[in-house]
Amino acid sequence: MDGNILSNAWVEVARLGDIPRLGSRVVATATGDVALFRTGDDSVFALDDHCPHKGGPLSQGIVHGHNVTCPLHNWVIDLSTGEAQAPDIGCVRRTPVRLEGDRILLALRA
Amino acid sequence: MVRPPHHHAAIWTFKRMNMLSPQRQRLVVIGNGMAGMRTVAELLARTPHRYDITVFGAEPHPNYDRIALSSVLAGEKTLDEIVINSRAWYDENNIRLITSDAAVSIDRLARTVTSASGLVAPYDKLLLATGSKPLVPPLPGLTLPGVCTFRDIADVNQMITASETQKRAVVIGGGLLGLEAAWGLKRRGMSVAVVHLMPTLMERQLDVAAGTLLQRDLDERGIAFFTNGQTEEITGTERATGVKLSDGREVPADIVVVAIGIRPNVDLGRACGLEVNRGIVVGDDMATADPSIYAVGECIEHRGQVFGLVLPIWEQAKVCAARLAGDEEACYVTPPLSTKLKITGIDVFSAGALSAAAEEDEELIYQDRKRGTYRKLVLRDNRIVGTVLYGEVKDGPWYFQQMRDGADIEAIRDRLILGEAAASLTGTVDPTAKVKALADSAEICGCNGVCKGTITAAINDLKLTTLDGVRAHTKASASCGSCTPLVEGLLLLTTGVDAKAAGPKPMCKCTSHGHAFVRKAIVAEGMKTIPEVMHRLGWLRPDGCHSCRPALNYYLLCAWPGEYVDDAQSRFVNERNHANIQKDGTYSVIPRMWGGQTNPRELRAIADVADKFGIPEMKVTGGQRIDLLGVKREDLPAVWADLNAAGMVSGHAYGKALRTVKTCVGSTWCRFGTQDSTSMGVALEKMTWGSWHPHKVKLAVSGCPRNCAEATIKDFGVIAVDSGWELHIGGNGGIHLRGTDLLCKVETPDEVLEYCGAFLQLYREEAYYLDRTAPYVERVGLDYVKARVVEDAENRRALHARFLHAQTFAQHDPWAAQNENATFKTLVPAE
Ligand SMILES: Cc1cc2nc3c(=O)[nH]c(=O)nc-3n(C[C@H](O)[C@H](O)[C@H](O)COP(=O)(O)OP(=O)(O)OC[C@H]3O[C@@H](n4cnc5c(N)ncnc54)[C@H](O)[C@@H]3O)c2cc1C
Ligand code: HEM
Ligand code: SF4
Ligand code: FES
């Protein structure tokens, strides 16, 4: 589940142009690394950089549609829900993202 | 599509002579569209000589497939590909075609038609086929530049031009037409919003559940929706800047496409006093109130019904042609209709009732949210009266057939919702039954208009046995692939070959095409980018998946050296980061050591790097070099910079690429050595390093048949003998150990280099992604490789030259290039 957005601060972490299309960047936060993804349609998603399977760095996976494939054992994670695609079961924590023009803001947990 | 055959030259001459005869009747057709020309074609098939035919068309084009405009907009077809009747066809059939000249009046007493340019054409029989006009509500701003409809080639050209310079599009209307427009514009790179009056999409063809699924899937593909949206105004002064909805919402846009429906084009009929309601009224004989005037297509009204799909129009054309040919019996009955949405990868099927309307109606519903599929059947008196399918539609035609036949489903009721296979009594469906029942003229491939007879003939004449063969020769199933099961059925029926069992596997779930087909198509059709391949070959998912993208990236890289720009996002992590990812997310870095040779300076530099970056572990690899394990992602560029400074480059130990060339010490030191195997290995590695391949490639050179470098389990192994060098191919270690096959023996080091380059290039050009040389050699056979590389000297030199040419673009140290790459850095929020 997402944290309570009200108690979080929106913090600018990057510009859209900092992330390649179908690519990602890693953001260091107080609660661990967060992977920031940019999809083919320029949507941006933020998930913990930690695969629910064995902790692979999701930021290094291949992005396709609104999914990322983990680089370690090919689990496919749905970026919008954080859930692993069947038959695998698992879920990654999401961080709320907001786009203001080309500024990317994250609701970081204090 | 059923197309009447063209006429032979002999008949043509006969007709020309006949033209002079005064008895021939004159047929004038107004509207050079799908209905009008289908009627003419049907008429010519029945009676080629009865009429002198004149056709007036308001558009500048010969008759084209209006349905395919959606595919043209989406970039899946070109305008040339959608012409149905070329100008040559009109000539061959002695039809006088007048384009860009609308008929403006009909004089029923004098029996003449007058055109905008003033031409007057007398008729004995007149056919109205003026189609329909886009429905446009009386909105403020409608006439602003940037507002268009979706009906003809001019509209599509306008949208394509807009998409090249403009960014945002709004489509008003979430029906079939509007959604296809939205998808086309999206594929052309625009950001697209759809404004729809109703709460769910395509509400006339889909129930709420299916409409909601459709919206979710399109939403996922990046189309925004404003449902319950009543457009009040198109904003802007100079040109359209957006639309304003009655609830106050505003949607900005550079172009606005109005696609809310169509209205029969009845102007001419009304002006000359024919009976007109919503459309020009015709009877079962397709004649209007005036017995010498007929009408077909979207401009008509028959028994209170108007039309918007081609299926009933084909029926009308048949009946009208029969009447014009003198058949007094032919009568038109509207066939039951079904709907399909033409958006690649989105499968929708609907026919008949959408939901239970009366008390005795029942609904059967089956929904699988995870797979995104939904099926609903509406039953009345144990018969299917309606069906809505979403996500998986292969049973659509079968349900539709049951519905048209009025079949009693009592006996299969419990399994009915699971589809044909489950419902058939034996539990299995004869895969050929469906195609067996079709007429030769039945269309199999809608995309390329290929009918059953054409495919069967090609299979027989050209002795085709594979799906790819049929695709290459007939184009059937070569575009969107949805007819693949039917084509496979035809292959099985005609040749007994089960293409599904024998045929190539699709590359992945994103496509029905196999590797071989895609590789060939890339070269043959000159496709140069991943999006282009995906568009033209009908990929089901807009940016593919982790399995097809790396393969396509490699195929393009191999096909267009120096021209194709490598797509980092389509590379597996190791190739993108030029290091091997480990199970804890750290990396291992292996610098190249040519032929396994090293020196104190390199060893010192490696030791310094290990100290400086706190490398937790070092190991000598099986490929005769040193591995630095546990490097952090952020440290990679700095580690490379230090190794580069000492003159070392990436070892590509992570890539589908040339890995190592293992060598023994050879004649320089060894008492058994016959040749300098180390120098040979270094020369091979200098020639081949940096090359990308379908899979990893390992080389080795041993100085004598004792084979200390284990050359006989390598992709290309060299063993020195007294009189020269033995060349071995197709070996590997690993789970399925395979020893090499002997390719040949050569005499000089230069020959070793040439044969090696030639073999590797052959493998690069022909193997499927992720096949190593061993399965490649087994697939094509050793004799084939010998024929291409050993026996055909010219071909060998050409292959070697292509390899060297590709190498001029590949031999750049990726580490040096990546040094400055910011994406390795972790972002730190300012506060
Ligand atoms: C984008 C799009 C997608 C579609 N997709 C599908 C689909 O998937 N399935 C399906 O079944 N149907 C589809 N249709 C509908 C199908 O194309 C029509 O039902 C069919 O074209 C109707 O044929 P018609 O001859 O009546 O009209 P048209 O094909 O429109 O032909 C009428 C012609 O008459 C000309 N004309 C009009 N007035 C005059 C005049 N006074 N003088 C001279 N010429 C005149 C017009 O310029 C036009 O060329 C689609 C339509 C569009 C626009
Ligand atoms: C993802 C899985 C794998 C990883 C990460 C991996 C990694 C490595 C690395 C880093 C080396 C050192 C190579 C060098 O110096 O360049 C190596 C060597 C080797 N690997 Fe793998 N490997 C993998 C899979 C395989 C497989 C599937 C096979 C068998 C087909 C295989 C067979 C070998 C062999 C035989 C060597 C020794 C090379 C030689 O002596 O020439 N490896 N591997
Ligand atoms: S392969 Fe032959 S030449 Fe090379 S080290 Fe072994 S014995 Fe010596
Ligand atoms: S750690 Fe992600 S798939 Fe195994």
Image (cartoon, rainbow, N blue to C red):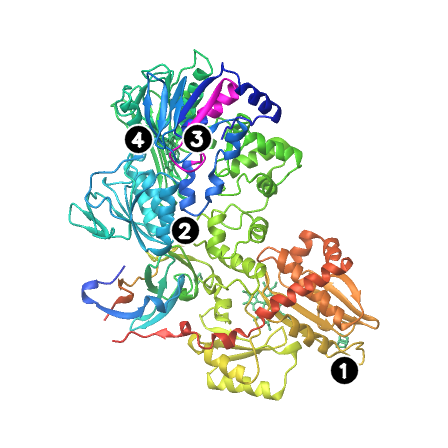
* Upstream in sequence: badge 3 or badge 4: 4
Image coordinates of residue B223 in percent, x first then y, are 32, 50
Q: CA distance from mark 2 to mark 1?
A: 58 Å
Label 4 packing within 10 angstroms: few (<14), some (14-19), many (20+)? many
Where's the C terminus of chain B, which quadrant? bottom left
Mark 3 or 2: the one toward you: 3
Identify the residue under disc 3.
Answer: B397
Mark 3: C-beta under 8 Å from nearest atom of ligand 1:
no
Q: Which mark is residue B354?
A: 4
Mark 2 or 1: the one toward you: 1
Label 3 packing within 10 angstroms: few (<14), some (14-19), many (20+)? some
Q: Which mark is residue A86?
A: 2
Q: Residue furthest top?
A: B328
Image coordinates of residue B485 in percent, x first then y, are 52, 37
**Image: B793 above or below B401:** below
Residue at the image position 26 percent from the left and 40 percent from the top: B200
Looking at the picture, tell me which residue is in the foreground, A23 or B590.
A23
Q: CA distance from mark 3 to mark 4?
A: 16 Å
Magenta range is B39-65
Q: Are marks 1 and 3 in contact (CB under 8 Å)?
A: no
- Say what secondary structure mark 3 lies in: helix
Question: Mark 2 is on which residue type?
Answer: Ala
Q: CA distance from mark 1 to mark 4?
A: 84 Å
Q: Are marks 3 and 4 in contact (CB under 8 Å)?
A: no
Tell me the quarter of the picture where residue B720 sits: bottom right
Residue at the image position 48 percent from the left and 80 percent from the top: B639
- Say what secondary structure mark 2 lies in: loop
Question: Mark 3 is on which residue type?
Answer: Pro
